Image: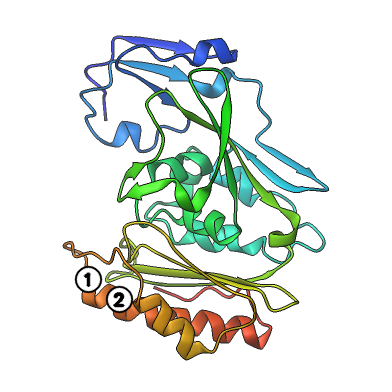
Amino acid sequence: MDLTAVTSYRVARSRADLSLAPGERFLAGGTWLFSEPNRDVTGLVDLAGMPWEPLVVDDAGLTIGATCTIARLLALPARPGWTAQPLFAQAAHSLLASFKIWNEATVVGNICRSYSAAAMLAACATLDAQAVVWTPAGDHRIVPVADLPTGNGTTALAHGELVREVRIGGDALAARTALRKVALAELGRSGAVVTGRMHRDGRTVVVVTAATLTPTVLRYDSPPAATQASDDARAGEGFYTDPLGSADWRRHLAGLLAAQVVEELSSGAGGREDAS
């Protein structure tokens, strides 16, 4: 879709170029930006010129740069010991977007768009990812990815702030993971997504997205019973009703899927994706 109000376009090549004028917006993949009229957008600042590595793998874990596409993340060769790595592909297949979109859409863009069904947000929240936020003043702050969304499509980011990168620690990447999702239509937007990870010492994290306006993160020091995870998921806040499902339906599914995720993780399987 054409952005008919845009009158300026520039490529950012240094941090100084990231200062936004009124009406300007950052452009990375642009798959959402160009999908709606966005008549308040009068200028684009293209991040493609910034000298950022898409992915950095080191002893600390994985860093996903602001311009890394979903396809680039999925193409990362399997790393020994990163049991959680298949979760990224599972999350990508949960998106309401074809594989063609993966070549343009960015991981960080999906996170910053912060729709309740943002699947890359779900994966990164499950892995306790940390977002490095650059501010217009020239400093930065670190925010848990799970805390970025404030609603369905709204974030804690102020105008001019930019998620420079997302960091995922090696400890989380070594854990077993699981994903379950349900949608009313095979190719429709997810009505409920539950993801989880479990460590060798029993530490467990279960995350509900799509069913709630913001991620619901449940933490356990030892593997919970399936019934406990189900009850805890249903006790969360932010379940909502829209044309794709009622709040009660989403709450029910969250509990059902949370139990399945915990059962899979406790069985030692991990990594299997359920069908819509």
Q: Is residue 111 above or below residue 54?
A: below
Residue 123 location, x and y as percent? 54, 58
Q: Nearer the viewer, residue 125 or 46?
A: 125
Instruction: Report whether 234 appears left or right of 75.
Output: left
Identified at 56% across, 84% down, the residue is 224
For numbered disc 2, what is the local secondary structure?
helix
Residue 191 location, x and y as percent? 31, 67
Can residue 106 be seen here? no
Q: Quadrant of residue 140?
A: top right
Identified at 71% across, 53% down, the residue is 169
Q: Is residue 248 above or below residue 140?
A: below
Instruction: Report whether 25 appears left or right of 81.
Output: left
Task: Check the picture and name the quadrant holding the C terminus.
Answer: bottom left
Q: CA distance from mark 2 to mark 1?
A: 6 Å
For numbered disc 1, what is the local secondary structure?
helix
Q: Which residue is mark 2?
A: 251
Residue type at mark 2 is: Arg
Residue 106 location, x and y as percent? 51, 39
Residue type at mark 1 is: Ala
Decide: few, some or many residues near mark 2? Use Cα within 10 Å; few <14, some 14-19, many ≥20: many
Instruction: Report whether 164 appears left or right of 156.
Output: right
